[in-house]
Image (cartoon, rainbow, N blue to C red):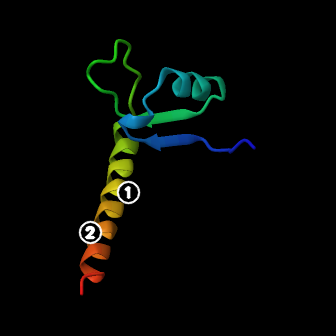
Amino acid sequence: MVLEFEDLHADKAFDSTTIIAELDKREDTAVISHPPRRSRLQPLDREMYKWRHLIENFFCKLKEFKQIAMRQ
């Protein structure tokens, strides 16, 4: 099964040469921040990365509020 999408918004855990090569082959965009140790940096769309970061923070807040709600 192949998923269809145009952009992959991910964190540094998905920064893999294999994943980025597959996205390039499919002509999709990778919005992944790269660690400084990476030898060949990929271009990063800063505006799209801001949205990815906002969504990531939203899920962190949901987890935080779940912990508060589950207290007895």
| Crowd band around label 2 with a 10 angstrom C-alpha radius: few (<14), some (14–19), many (20+) | few
Q: Residue at x 37, y 57 (%)?
A: 55
Q: Are marks 2 and 1 in contact (CB under 8 Å)?
A: no
Residue that carries the numbered disc 1 in the rendered image: 55
Question: Between 48 and 3, which is closer to the camera in this rendering?
Answer: 3
- Residue 64 is marked as 2
Q: Earlier in the sequence, mark 2 or mark 1?
A: 1
Q: Quadrant of residue 56?
A: bottom left
Give the amino acid at mark 2. Answer: Glu
Q: Judge from the rendering whether residue 40 lies leftward or rightward of residue 18; answer left or right.
A: left
Residue lying at the far right in this picture: please name it. Answer: 1
Picture layout, residue 26 above or below residue 40: below
Pinpoint residue 66: horizontal percent, then vertical percent.
32, 75
Give the amino acid at mark 1. Answer: Ile
Question: Between 38 and 5, which is closer to the camera in this rendering?
Answer: 38
Pinpoint residue 44: horizontal percent, then vertical percent.
38, 30
Question: Between 32 and 48, which is closer to the camera in this rendering?
Answer: 32
What is the CA distance from the residue labelled 2 to the residue labelled 1?
Answer: 14 Å
* Figure quadrant of the N terminus: top right
